[in-house]
Image (cartoon, rainbow, N blue to C red):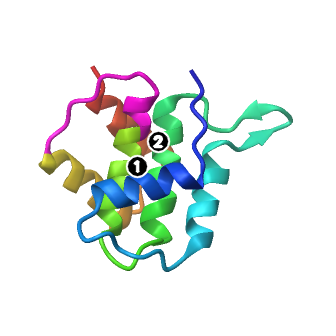
Amino acid sequence: MDLRIDLAWLLMIAEHKTPGDPQVTDWGALVAAVSRHEAEIFGVPVYETPHDRAAALLQVLLHIPALERSNALFASSVAYAYLVSSGLKVVTSPEQVRDLARLVKEDGASVHAIADQLRLWSL
């Protein structure tokens, strides 16, 4: 199943999964995330699997903060929710989420490396 998300879906995740309902400070980051996860070249998806698309979402939302605060939590929540909404069973721990966010933000992990880590979250 190729789940396509939109701006409303991202805003719902922000509202329900980030404490204190932080305000959007960069709408372009959200628009970029929506566009990136559904990118195609000559009709061929750039990100073929749900893990690839979740990784693209996580990476862009961590590197281009959309909210006034809690961007790592938001980006991780979006990736998790994307996988679950795609029909996958996801099991992870707070430590795994933290480590992945650090890998992306501090170590500059590629989208492929992020997708590989997200695959470890899926049963």
Q: Residue furthest right?
A: 42
Say which label, 2 or 1, has the lower sequence index. Answer: 2
Q: Secondary structure at mark 2?
A: helix
Magenta highlight on residue 88? yes
Q: Position of residue 17 (x, y in %)?
A: 29, 55
Determine contact: label 2, label 1, CB under 8 Å: yes
Q: Quadrant of the C terminus?
A: top left
Viewer-nearest of labels 2 and 1? 1
How many numbered discs?
A: 2
Give the residue drawn at x 30%, y 26%.
Answer: 122
Left or right: 24 in relation to 80: right
Magenta highlight on residue 45? no
Q: Position of residue 49 (x, y in %)?
A: 54, 28
Where 104 falls versus 54 (above or below)?
A: below
Q: Nearer the viewer, residue 73 or 113?
A: 73
Left or right: 29 in relation to 12: right
Q: CA distance from mark 2 to mark 1?
A: 8 Å
Q: Position of residue 92 (x, y in %)?
A: 19, 37
Question: Residues in magenta?
Answer: 82-93
Give the residue drawn at x 38%, y 60%.
Answer: 14
Near mark 1 (Cα within 10 A), the count class, few <14, some 14-19 or many ≥20, is many
Q: Quadrant of residue 68?
A: bottom left
Q: Position of residue 6 (x, y in %)?
A: 60, 48
In the image, which disc is placed on residue 54? Answer: 2
Give the residue drawn at x 63%, y 61%.
Answer: 32
Q: Quadrant of residue 38?
A: top right
Q: Main secondary structure of the magenta part?
A: loop
In the image, which disc is placed on residue 78? Answer: 1
